[in-house]
Image (spheres, coloured by chain):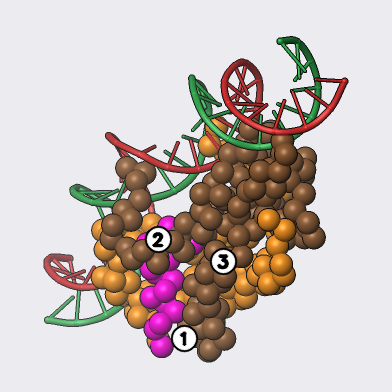
Chain colours: A brown, B orange, C red, D green
Amino acid sequence: MGLTKTDNFTAEQNELAAFAKALGHPARVAIIEYLSTQASCVCGSIVDAIPLAQATVSQHLKELKNAGLIQGNIEGNSICYCLNPEKWKKFKQMLEPTFTHIEQPVCC
Amino acid sequence: MGLTKTDNFTAEQNELAAFAKALGHPARVAIIEYLSTQASCVCGSIVDAIPLAQATVSQHLKELKNAGLIQGNIEGNSICYCLNPEKWKKFKQMLEPTFTHIEQPVCC
DNA sequence: TTGTCTTATTGCAATATTACGATAATGATT
DNA sequence: AATCATTATCGTAATATTGCAATAAGACAA
């Protein structure tokens, strides 16, 4: 098959899965880390920072944008990418229950 | 291709990506949520809780186990699955820099 | 042992992902 | 207008993922 049965799950579960899936590739992790350490969002330089071809990086940026984890603003003839705080807050918030659960003693 | 170039990235980036990828499916999100709300880890009941065939759920459990996010202990003729606190702490820790970065004003 | 219950594995078919070269599209510069 | 710089898209080949029925493998009970 290869087709995820999203209908069987809640919108929240699908959204959390979409966030996680977007982060589920080392290149996209590297992009997020890069954007997390930039005071200002240097943009075209993402391509230089990621050891993959420009077309491939552009594809990864598109996936992060589709998931909502980053946003891009046109700035002259280049594009300024940066993190989307709202989505990241939601991502964090959805992970909280599990993060707090692991503080308790586990059964096995 | 379809083959992720892990060699180009750090071990940490690959590990974070592996965690995220494991969580990147609504069924696996549902499994984690289920284990996060259980006082004791009821185990075979995961299959009943997830609206997919037993074989498919078993496959998802295997992926979560491979990523280290859950662990399974044999208990009689059934298996007790629960969250792996160590890995979840590492997962959380690796996301922290981004979570804190979004608290600052963004550029675009 | 035989049967039952529980979980894993195998073997598919359908679809998705990854990567890159080539090319297009857009804005800036000359 | 012509060119350059930057980013997106297309086309492609290779590989991965998803889902399930069927089957296997394990522990326990009678």
The three-letter amino acid code for the residue at tag 3 is Glu
Q: Name the residue tied to disc 3.
A: A86
Q: Where is residue A62 shown, x and y percent of the image?
A: 56, 43
Q: Which mark is residue A14?
A: 2
Task: Determine which residue is flagged by label 1.
Answer: A107
Question: Which residue is located at x 40 percent, y 67 percent?
Answer: A12
The residue drawn where x is 53% and y is 74% is A93
Left or right: residue D2 versus residue C11 is right
Q: Nearer the viewer, mark 3 or mark 1?
A: 3
- Between residues C23 and A18, which one lies in front from this camera angle? C23
Distance from label 3 to label 1 (Cα)? 35 Å
The answer to whether any part of residue B107 appears in the image is yes
Characterize the local packing of mark 2: few (<14), some (14-19) or many (20 or more) Cα atoms within 10 angstroms: many
Residue drawn at point x = 57 percent, y = 57 percent: A69
Q: Is residue A1 above or below residue D13?
A: below
Count residues near mark 3 (Cα–Cα under 10 Å), then give few for <14, some for 14-19, many for 20+: few
Q: In the depicted view, which residue is nearer to us: C9 or D4? A: D4
Between residues B102 and D12, which one lies in front from this camera angle?
Answer: B102
* Residue B25, quarter of picture: bottom left
Q: Report the amino acid beneath label 1.
A: Cys
- What is the chief secondary structure element of the magenta stretch? helix
Is residue B7 visible in the rendered structure shown here? no
SS assignment at label 3: helix
Instruction: Work out whether residue B4 or residue B62 is closer to the camera in this orientation and state it.
Output: B4
Query: First in sequence: mark 1 or mark 2?
Result: 2
